[in-house]
Amino acid sequence: MMAAALSLLGNYLLYLLPGLALHGVWFGLTPRHLMGLRIAILLLGFVLLRDVMTPLQFWTLGAGAQIGFIANPWVLAGLGLLSLATLAGLARIDPPLWALVIWVRRGWLAGIGVGLLAGAALGVPLRLYAGIGLEPTMGPWLLGMAVLALGGNALEEVLFRGLLQGYLEQRCEPWRAALLSAVAFAACHGFLAFSVTRAGWPVLLFTLLEGLICAGLRWRHGVLAAIAAHATAIWLIAVPM
């Protein structure tokens, strides 16, 4: 299973290489003072990273309120660790952008607690609606899915709530920055909803609601709270393919 996971992850990176290389050149040539454009490049790069997983059959939007992920837990864990490595690389190569990320407001423990509750409030009803159950053999898969939910959604939240919302807060009212972050988050799922998967408007509705919740958490409690909510919701509605 480990060897198969390494092969799949290697194919994923190889498949991404041309597109990522162009994004890297674009990002590198963009002057550092054009922070808005640099953030937009990172968001487009993330959309590429995420949406390529669909044709490679790493994940799919299933029937009802559930998301199917590849059954190999090592692939899931690898994707989560790659996401965390991407965050570490971003922090190293662009400290001014990284300084936009506000991790904690009103205490980290309270933020994570509120985030977990918000994620459960979003994910539990959808899990019950979809009738998602647990099997004894799902233990390793759930652990791998937890790594992906944490790492992958940490990357997504840092980009949308840390960088984009943080950048916008310096230029408009906090409530408007939060709203713009949520709408941008949903809009960046448009290609996934109508072209990659053709799941349509339910994807946009869910991501807009999720974006509003996470943007509000970022505004009041910081990025850690938004990560906790996003990761919890996705973990709760995930099923093995």
Image (cartoon, rainbow, N blue to C red):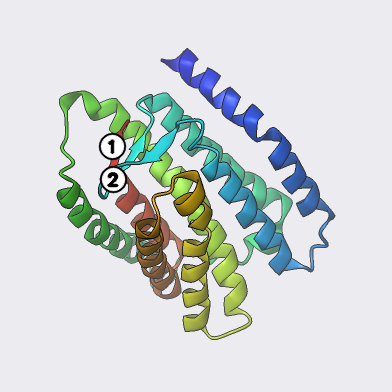
Sequence order check, earlier mark of 2 and 1: 2
| Above or below, comparing residue 180 to residue 138 in the picture | below
Residue 121, quarter of the rendered image: bottom left
Residue shown at the point (38%, 24%) measured from the top left: 72
Residue shown at the point (77%, 68%) measured from the top left: 34
For the residue carrying disc 1, how many other residues have a C-alpha within 10 Å: few (<14), some (14-19), or many (20+)?
many
Percent coordinates x, y for residue 87 in the rendering = 58, 48
Circles 2 and 1: CB atoms closer than 8 Å: yes
Q: Is residue 103 visible?
A: no
- Mark 1 element type: strand
Which amino acid type is shown beneath numbered disc 2? Answer: Gln
For the residue carrying disc 2, how many other residues have a C-alpha within 10 Å: few (<14), some (14-19), or many (20+)?
many
**In front: 169, or 67?**
67
Residue 222, quarter of the rendered image: bottom left
Give residue 66's mark: 2
Residue 206, quarter of the rendered image: bottom left
Where's the C terminus, which quadrant? top left
Q: CA distance from mark 2 to mark 1?
A: 7 Å
Percent coordinates x, y for residue 22 in the rendering = 76, 44
Where's the N terminus, which quadrant? top left
- Mark 2 element type: loop
Percent coordinates x, y for residue 156 in the rendering = 50, 53
| Above or below, comparing residue 13 to residue 93 in the picture | above
Give residue 55's mark: none
Percent coordinates x, y for residue 215 in the rendering = 43, 69
Residue shown at the point (53%, 67%) measured from the top left: 184
**In front: 149, or 212?**
212
Which amino acid type is shown beneath numbered disc 1? Answer: Val
Describe residue 26's horizontal placement relative to residue 179 as left or right.
Answer: right
Give residue 239's mark: 1
